[in-house]
Structures are given as C-alpha cells and as structure tokens.
Image (tube, coloured by chain):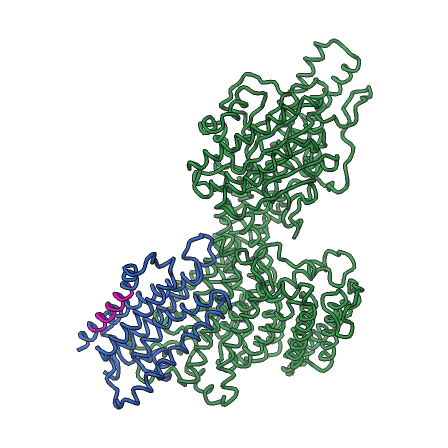
Amino acid sequence: MKDTDIKRLLYTHLLCIFSIILSVFIPSLFLENFSILETHLTWLCICSGFVTAVNLVLYLVVKPNTSSKRSSLSHKGTRFLKCCIYFLTSCFSFHVIFILYGAPLIELALETFLFALILSAFTTVPCLCLLGPNLKAWLRVFSRNGVTSIWENSLQITTISSFVGAWLGALPIPLDWERPWQVWPISCTLGATFGYVAGLVISPLWIYWNRKQLTYKNN
Amino acid sequence: MRLGSGTFAACCVAIEVLGIAVFLRGFFPAPVRSSARAEHGAEPPAPEPSAGASSNWTTLPPSLFSKVVIVLIDALRDDFVFGSKGVKFMPYTTYLVEKGASHSFVAEAKPPTVTMPRIKALMTGSLPGFVDVIRNLNSPALLEDSVIRQAKAAGKRIIFYGDETWVKLFPKHFVEYDGTTSFFVSDYTEVDNNVTRHLDKVLKRGDWDILILHYLGLDHIGHISGPNSPLIGHKLSEMDSVLMKIHNSLQSKERETPLPNLLVLCGDHGMSETGSHGASSTEEVNTPLILISSAFERKPGDIRHPKHVQQTDVAATLAIALGLPIPKDSVGSLLFPVVEGRPMREQLRFLHLNTVQLSKLLQENVPSYEKDPGFEQFKMSERLHGNWIRLYLEEKHSEVLFNLGSKVLRQYLDALKTLSLSLSAQVAQYDIYSMMVGTVVVLEVLTLLLLSIPQALHRKAELEVPLSSPGFSLLFYLVILVLSAVHVIVCTSAESSCYFCGLSWLAAGGVMVLASALLCVIVSVLTNVLVGGNTPRKNPVHLGSRWSELDLLILLGTVGHVLSLGASSFVEEEHQTWYFLVNTLCLALSQETYRNYFLGDDGEPPCGLHVEQGLDGATATWQDGPGYDVLERDKGHRSPSTSKVLRGREKWMVLASPWLILACCRLLRSLNQTGVQWAHRPDLGHWLTSSDHKAELSVLAALSLLVVFVLVQRGCSPVSKAALALGLLGVYCYRAAIGSVRFPWRPDSKDISKGIIEARFVYVFVLGILFTGTKDLLKSQVIAADFKLKTVGLWEIYSGLVLLAALLFRPHNLPVLAFSLLIQTLMTKFIWKPLRHDAAEITVMHYWFGQAFFYFQGNSNNIATVDISAGFVGLDTYVEIPAVLLTAFGTYAGPVLWASHLVHFLSSETHSGSALSHACFCYALICSIPVSTYIILVTSLRYHLFIWSVFSPKLLYEGMHLLITAAVCVFFTAMDQTRLTQS
C-alpha cells in the first residue's frame, strides 16, 4: 500500500518535471526567437502556466486527500474563489518580500511580479491543491513534525527546496562575471526552478529511503 | 587556572589584535620615503664636488631636450615590441629600435602589476606601497614628489590624454587633458580614438613641453581575449602608426628648436598568458622601454636582447632629461645611455646628482647606512669626482682627464646600482615572515576559542585554562627552541628587510613565548577533549536534530559570509551579504513567531513524524549531563508560557514586528547606495543632501532627533533625560550653524560658521551623561543589592553614545540612528523577550544588525567612504588623537551601538547569571572567525589583480573592527566583573 503510494508520488512528480521541460521546448515551436534568457518573461508566464495546469490536473486525477465530505456546487465555488484569492495574495506577498530583500521598487516591477508568480506556482499552487485554503493546515505542514502523509511530506520538501533555490539564486548577482543570467530576476527564477525540480526528484527518493522510519498517524 | 568565559574571550581577542598588528606590519611594508615633504619646496641642488678648489657650477644642469612625448601603452609586454609580434605588426618601431637613433630597454615592473601603482612608479620613481593610500585618505591625488610636480614647478606645460587615473593622481597639473575611463573593458577602439583624435591638433601646436598619452585599448583586449588574439595585432599596428605620426612630427619640428626632442614609448605592466595582470610572472613584469631622439647615437649591439632595467629608473632619467631635480623618493638610477653623448663634466654631474639623491634617501631610511656598500662606493666616487674637477679646472692634459673621468664614471655607475638595489629591497616584497608570525598567533587563538566552545557556553560560564602546563611541559621549551632557531635562520638569511627581525630581541622573544604557550594550551585542551570521555560528546547525531532553524541560519550565514570574503565582488558588495542575511533572519524570526502563536507548543506535534531512535532517551542524557544551556536548550520551557501570557494588541505587535523591521531595513537600504557596482544609482541620501531639498532634510533630521529622544529617554534618570534633550537640541543647532539644515524661523541664513560652540555644547552633555552612567555603575558595584541602578547606568552610557553618534552623523544619516533605536526597541519588546532566545542567539543577532548598520550608514569596504568630517566636529584645527577617535567612532557607530545595547539588554533582561559572559565569548568568536579566515585568504591572494584596490582596504577594515571588538569585549568583561563582585 505504501509502496504504491510512493510510486504514484513519483509518477506525478515526473509529470511535473516533464511539464517544466516542455515549457522550455514547446514555445520555440510557436514563437520566434524564443529562449529562456532573452525572452525570459514569456518563459516565466508559460512555465508558471504549465506547472499550475499540471498540478491542477494531477490533483483532479490523483485525488491525494480523500476527505472532501461536502461537495455541493456552491461550496466548491467558494472554495475555488478562495483559492484564487489566496493565490493572488501569495503573489503579492512574494512581491513585497522581494522588494524588502532589495528588489527595485519601481523599475523592473513586472519582472519582479512574474518572479513572484512563478514562485507561487511552484509553492502556493501545490499547497492549495493539497491542503485547500486552510491556513492552519499550512502552518501545521510547515512546522517541525507536522506532516501527516507522504503527499504532505513531499509538498514540504518541494516547497522548501524552491524557496532555498530562489534564495541561493540571488547569490551570484553581485559577482562581476558579466553573464546574461546574472540580471535580476533571472538567476533567482532559475534558482527557484532548479530548486523545485530538485525537490521533485529528491522527495520520492527521500521518502523511499526513510519509509521504515516514517509513520503517519492518519495512515 | 579558572577563568570566566568573558575574561577568557577578552584575553583571546587582545592577543589576536597583537597578531593582526604584526601581520599588517608585514603585509604593508613601510615605504621608503624621504622625510622632507614635497610641499616644503625645492632645496638647492647638490653642488659639484670639488677637492679644494671651488667649483663654479652649483645650479641644476639645463634641460637636454626641448619637448618630451611619453606614449604609455597599457599592458604592453616586451615581446610585443621586441619579439616576433613586434616585427610583424610594429614595423616602424622595429625600424627605430634596430636602425634609428634610439635606446631600448626592458623595464621590469614590480608587483602589484596594476596600472595606478605603476604610473606612480614611473613618475615618482618610488615603489608605492598600500600605506600611501591610507596616508592620503580620501584624496586619490599623489602627494609625493614626482616628475610631473617638478615639471609644473619649473613652469613646463604638460598636456595629457588617456586613462583618467592620471587626472586623479595629478589634479591641476595639466594645462590640457582629456581623461578616458577604463570602466568598460569591452570597449577597445573608442577608448583609444578618444586619445588619438587630439593628436594632430596638438602636434601642430608648439605650446607645450611635455605630452603624455596613455592608451588603454591593448589592456582591454588582453582582458577580453588574451595575448594571442588577432585583435592584438590590429591594436599594435594602430599604436605603431601613432608612434610614426608623433616621431615624424617631432623630427620636422626639430629644425626650429636648438635642442632635440625625446619620444618615450613604454608600458606600465605586461600581460600574462591568460591576458590578465597583477601578479609577478615574467610576462606581467617585463615591459619595453624605448627612448627615441635624434641626439642619440646608435651603438652596434644585440638588439634582440635589450638591457634589463627597473621601471623606477624612468623617473630619474626623465628628470635629468628635462633639467629638473630628481623626485625625492625615487629609488631609480639614471639610464646612462641617455646622457652618453654629453661632455664628460656634464655626465659626471648628472651621475653625482643621482647618487646624492639616492644616498640621502638611504640615510633617512636605513639606520646603519654607513655600512652599506653602496654608500661607501658613493663616498669614494665623490672624492674621485672632486679630484677630477680640480684637474679639470686646472685644465690638465686631456687624455689623463678622460681616463680618470671614465674611472669615476664607472665608480658612479656601480654606486648607483648598489644604492638602487639596496633601496628597492626595502619595499619590494611582502614581509612573509612577519605575516606568518601574525597568522600563527591569530590561528592559535581561533583554535583555542573554537575548542573551548563547549566549556565556555556551559551553564557556569567558566573554563579551565591550563596555563600552568606550558611552564612544566617539555613541549613548550622545545617549541620555543625551534622557533628561536627558525627566527635566527630567517633573519640572518633574509635578503629583504623584515619587520619582525628588526624588533628587539625581547619583543620578538615575547611573541615567540606567547605563540608556543598558546600551542601548548591548545594541545592540552585538545587532549582533555579527546581523552576526557566524561564530556558529553557521545552522541553528536542528536546535536543537529535539536538545533532550531534559527541556529542553523546563524551557522550557515556565518560560514557563508566567511566564504564570500574570498571573492573580490563579494568583498566590494559586502553590504548586500549583510542585508540579505538580516532579511533572512527577520523572515526566520517571523516564521518562529507565527509558529509560536498559531500552533502553540511545537514540542508536541499533533501527529508526529516519529524518528525511531529514541529522542526521549537522548533528552534524558542531555539533562543528566552538564547541560548545554546555550547551544542546546530545552524548547519545552520556552513556548508554552508565551502563548498564554500575551493577548490582543500585543500579540499582533509581536506578529507584525519582524515585518516592521524588514520595512525599516528596506528604507535604510535605499538611503545610501554603497559598494561598487550599484554605487552610482540615485539614492535618498543624495536627494536629501542636494541644496534644493534642504527643507525636507531639516524636517527629517528634526523628526529623527525627536524619535531618538523618545526612544532613549525612557531608560534614563531625570537629570540625564534633560541633558539628552538639550544635547539633541544642540545637535540640531550645530547642523544649522554649519548650514546643512535650517531653522523654520530663519529660512535663509547666510552666516555659516564651523559650529564650534554648538558642537562643544553637545560634547559637554555627552561627557556629562557618560559620567553619570559611570557613576551609577560604580555605585551599583559598591551597593551590592542595587540591581536597578546598574541597568540605569548601562542605559545612560548607551544614551551618551547615541548622543555622540547623533552629533557625528551627517544629517541625512540621522534616520539610520533613529531606525536603529526603533529596531532595537521592537526586537527587545516583541521578539527577544517573548521568544526567550538565549544569550548566544541574541549576541549573533546583535552582531549581524551591527554589521548591517555599518553599511546602512553609507560605509563600504573602500577607504574613500570613511567620513573624515566626523573628526573635525567641534575642533578648530586638525588635532590628531581626537580626530582619529571621533572618526573611528563615527564609522563604527552602528556596531558599537548595537554592542552596547546588547550589554544593557542582557544585564537587564536575563536573570541567568552567565548571560553576559556567554555573550562576550560569542561576540569575540563571531568577530574573530572572519578576521582569521580573511588573513589566510589575503595571504594566498596576495598577487591577485585586485589586492590593492579591494582586498587590502578590507583587511584594514577587518583589523580596525577587531580592535573595536577588543574594546567591546573589555567593556563586557568589566560589566561581568561587577556582576561577579555583587554575587
């Protein structure tokens, strides 16, 4: 039972990685002069769109949390609306955090916002899919020893690794290598992407290695 | 011997300061310098020596050339001219070298092979050390004697086109100039066209005496694509055509003037095989030097292998060629072929002038100059010269004269060579031996500090320092013996001068005893740690699991910052590192507050990830053993009380305060842009200081002073409250008096004074408050029970420092002070108190914020950003000691204020007795880790391209910071002693 769960987790994660790879290659079929570095903003939009879509589809197909008791249409509607509001809030709060970290206030506002968007796609969207608009649950998952299933565990790992990736991505900006990717926010978005992918790869493996030690009380 | 960990840490930092001082003395060799400053005007030239008969030639010899053109091509390597590339791409130059009237040399540059020091070497003839940069703090202009300076004094008209470093070095020396920046390395055509475009016009005009051209293009190509790129060939051909143009024009002009012209082609440094420069490889050091003039006679010789000379010889040669006094600090010797065509008497006169100048320099810099072989040779040749002059004036037989003359000449040349060599040996190299001694001492101290972490952060905050063991152990005496042997060997075999060898035997012996004693202490501590199994080091696995995210962040942040010091860009942009870390710290704190308030106790998760190895067992052993109450705390008794105590508004303040702090930091960050890459960006500070926004600045300054008053007064006694208010008013009056802010009732006051009275008025209050604080502290020591009095005393000292900082900060920086106090208040009230961080964490947070505020003030790792105006506040003229102290305090106000806040906070808030000593130990440790790592990094990077521009200033800042840390630690220990005497 557990091994099948881990397998499912692995497949969903592979799909997510695949969607990111697709977001790199598919647009060049339709758009001229598409490259990650030069038309970075386009790629940001496409990549976050792809990741969000894949996450939503996977959520609807796999249904990792089976505890949706009431499923009236109005309830679903408010839930969806709430999710949208949460997503936007997360975008704006990321934006504010980037500015607090020293991003320019007025110039490059679009770039900063798109970075916030892609980081939300990597972190907030999976959270919304898995936990719903429930802040208490979010806090529980992201505190020590608070996870209750492998899904939440992998969510924790991918989210934290995306954040760490974005954080580390800021480090090369002051270096004087004069590379095109050292410009704000490219190194950070690339860092976040690499962090997310790394999290997707690592989390099933980590759960697999530690499956003996992991006991969730709900399962 | 048992020591409190605070005392121990203070001793360690003091020893470390000693080590750093020795290291710095070795790293920055004292420059060879003539004591007569250049400003004092020219002293009369040395008269011609004569034995008995009086010589009639006491003035300087006249100029040998009418016009001099110096073409300096950046990064021109010797094989670009003399090698196959020269033959291929520089045909005209090759023709001049081989057949024309010219003298060619290979001039050796001394490291650092970087443009600015090399220009200095070419023009002053001295070997510039980094100390020069410190000496003329803030002003890049060259204060020493140079050919340019002498030429200007002699009324020569100098024109300069090229690298703007020259314009900065010699401001107001050129009658006409056009500086190009070497900022855009990728541009290698425009930068040279900007020089060449003036050429036609200038060559046609005759109204100049010296023309200097500095071409940067070749260097840029080297940086982009290396010495083998095809671009090099194009550039060399371009340079060749420039040279041809100048040479032809000079030749055509020569018919009009009685004297010939001189054209000098040289490079400032070479180019390594990868295209960079800065180090001391042969390719970087060897540059061509070609002197072209119709006055020269070509002698047949080996053209392919020109004679090797020193780059510093150029200054002396140019001075002689132009009939100027040789620059006082020049260590170079005259390039003799230049004057070979002159009559014998003149030749001897030139050589005499040069040797007199060098021997004077030797007398001033070497104590035992009389034993120097060069000096003896000089005395001998001067005597011979005198005899020759007597013969000459008596007009004896000409052949005898000639033979004797050439003998004197040879004597002079030998003397010159020896003198020049022994002078340049004084400064040429890093004094590696002193650097090693300093590094060893510092590293031993650091190891000792690291090894004693577990003991020092123990609840008792005491540690056993086995001081007696060195006295009895064989190891100690063996190490001393070995060190003395090494010392003797190194000092007797050293070619260059060495500071540590120059020390008296007692001082050197003292340092050696210290080093070996430290080594023995380390060894015995290490054996204690390894052998003594009772120390709770059995299960380090659990160590990690008990660390909170905050501890992890602090550890990683410290390690990351230390590692970042190895990259020049990170050193330049160190403020970004600190802002980044402080921001992350605030986010981590906010996460911690959220977790505490929304989840309650995180020690008991609702349904936990259960790690099979029994955590409970581990906890039990921890509590059994002597508990680490600092590094590993019990989370259990931190959280549960907090969520119950605070309710309502306060809770929301706790949750919001990290975000408020973040917002404050963001505002401060946009106040002063520092660093290098983004320093040119517009910032609020510039906006405020521009004269159009004086009203805004006044309002802001007044508001900030008000905030400072409101935040500081709450802890003071009534008397010091009044003093503080008056003092802050005085600060505003002072700023109004010197005209940076204005009063609302006197909008356009024209009378601007130095504000001496106002500033001294404030000083009186600063001293008064500090005095009251000290009095309270002393009183609290006598009356043991009065705990509150001590807190008040500490706060008064703190507020005295705040007032002093308010006086010294430039008005647009006053918000930095206000925000710093605001953040301290917020942190104290809503974060440290409710979350109950331990002393070590609080110390590190104070240190981080202190560092961030150092940069918020507008400081950077560049010497030029030191605000020396702080040293003149309230002083009529420059008085060295107060000026230095005030400048140091003004610069390090951020770290000092945070440290003094830390002392007050810990002694007032925590009731654990050992908090202060823990804090002192942590402060010492966290400051000494970067310093010790940095000196190793700098030693290994000493031939780096940016060693003088980036790493050396940072080294000085680190040294100064360590000194301040030592003072802070002593203060900590003093406070700790009062605690001990009370209990």
Answer left or right for B365 relative to B617.
right
Q: Residue at x 72, y 31 (%)?
A: B324
Establish if B343 lies above or below A43.
above
Percent of width and height locating residue B83: 46, 27
Say if the magenta span includes residue B63.
no
| Colour chain B is painted in | green
Residue A15 magenta-drawn?
yes
Residue B494 shows in this picture: no
Q: Which chain is blue?
A: A
Q: Nearer the viewer, residue B447 or A16?
A: A16
Query: Magenta span covers which residues?
Result: A8-20
Marker count (numbered): 0
Res B511 visible: yes
Image position, residue A112 (x, y; %): 44, 67
Q: Eyeballing the image, is B496 above or below B585? A: above
**In the image: residue B364, left or right of residue B296:** right
- Residue B416 percent location from the top left of the image: 64, 27
Which image quarter is the C terminus of chain B in?
A: bottom right
Q: Depth check: B761 or B295 in front? A: B295
Task: Give B552 or A136, whichever is nearer the viewer.
Answer: A136
Q: Quadrant of residue B96?
A: top right
The residue at 28%/67% (across/down) is A202
The foreground one among B499 and B602 is: B602
